[in-house]
Image: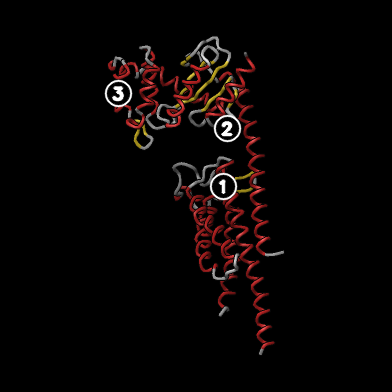
Amino acid sequence: MKQSHFTLIALLLMIAAFTVATLFYSTGLEQAQSDRASNNSAALIKDYSVRAGDPAAKVTIVEFMDPACGTCAQFYPFVKQMMSYYSGKVNLVVRYLPLHQGSDQMVAMLEAARKQGKFWEVLELMFASQSQWTVNHVAQPEVFLGFIEQAGVNVARIRQDMQAPVIQSVIQQDLADGDLLGADKTPTFFVNGKPLPSFGYKQLQALVEDELRANY
Amino acid sequence: MTLKKQAGAQQSLAEQQVHWRLIFVAWFIAALSTLASLFFSEVMNLIPCVLCWYQRIFMFPLAVILLLGLHPVDIRVARYTLPLAIIGLLFTLYHCLLFYGLIPESLQPCRQGVSCADDSMVLMGFLPIPLLSLAAFAIISAVLVKVSLLARHMP
């Protein structure tokens, strides 16, 4: 056998082994993740969680998110558009997974804004201005508080309500539930309790459409 | 005269074959290690610790440069790859000493982030990644030392 053929075959064999091992391993991983979600379904939704959409909708998206996460901000318009497109059939539950430094303060602001009925307004402003109040992936809550009034909230009350100890216990509970469910990145989505097979817009849309077909 | 020349040419052809095989072994291990380490990080989602990163820095180029030394066979490739292999070997020796606790915890350079010495380093319950890395760098270094010695007798 020519030496060059020998090298080529060795290289191809290695790549083939890598591909097969990858397929094998990721299938097992997907299965484990999906088992984990179904075994811990009680951890998916809590009574205190923020919801959007018709409560009677038969398809529920649970999103674990972090206000300081860039991908969450990029996904936001897509999720919002999907919610309005399937209006009445899909609802959304927001869980907090503040993995960035300083992010828990941003979550506290959201919870404080919720008391004024301005949760979504503040979240939209946060995502739209994210680059202004994050420096090297560290959230700067004071910077955002400097222009939070653009969302139409009472800033003094936000500052006061942010300190409520209950907010920290909500965050701890959400983090613990995320841990149980294997949600260790943001955003992590579950649709009717099922995790995405792999991360992406298309995968989220496909899973939502599967569940719509199964339930309507 | 012509006979002598022919004998010389034949000998060098046989020699070339030996060189090629040695370089092939080194390349094969380097390529295998490269793919394995990519599998650990990209498929198994193990986050490489600091020492793992340094070993990867010295392993990945070996997979490329040794391949170039195979086609056409170039014995001088040892000159360019042996230093990389030796430095990698030093990092992996240090990593193994840390992993087996022969260097005290307090000297550990990578306490922030991923630990270089915890159980996530052990595959399937019995195969420590630092040991695999040690084996790979040791074999590659030994083979390349042999190639270097052979190259010294070349004109």
Does dot 3 land on a helix, a strand or a loop? helix
User: Quick check: can you spot residue A30?
Assistant: yes
Which image quarter: residue A112? Answer: top left
Which label is found at residue A103? none
Q: Chain of mark 1?
A: B
Which amino acid type is marked by label 1? Leu
Residue B24 location, x and y as percent? 63, 63
Which label is found at residue A198? 2
Residue B46 location, x and y as percent? 55, 42
Q: CA distance from mark 1 to mark 3?
A: 43 Å
Q: Is residue A74 above or below residue A16?
A: above
Q: Earlier in the sequence, mark 2 or mark 3?
A: 3
- Residue pointed to by mark 3: A145
- Residue pointed to by mark 1: B38
For label 3, count other residues whose C-alpha is less than 10 Å away and answer few (under 14), some (14-19) or many (20+): some
Does dot 1 land on a helix, a strand or a loop? helix
Q: Chain of mark 2?
A: A
Q: Both on one chain, marks 1 and 3?
A: no
Q: Is residue A91 above or below residue B39?
A: above
What residue do we see at 67% from left, 52% from top? A13
Which amino acid type is marked by label 3? Leu
User: Quick check: can you spot residue B142?
Assistant: no
Q: CA distance from mark 2 to mark 3?
A: 36 Å
For label 2, count other residues whose C-alpha is less than 10 Å away and answer few (under 14), some (14-19) or many (20+): few
Does dot 2 land on a helix, a strand or a loop? loop
* Extreme residue in the top direction: A56
Which amino acid type is marked by label 2? Ser
* Extreme residue in the right direction: A1
Residue B60 location, x and y as percent? 53, 55
Tell whether A211 sits left or right of A102. right
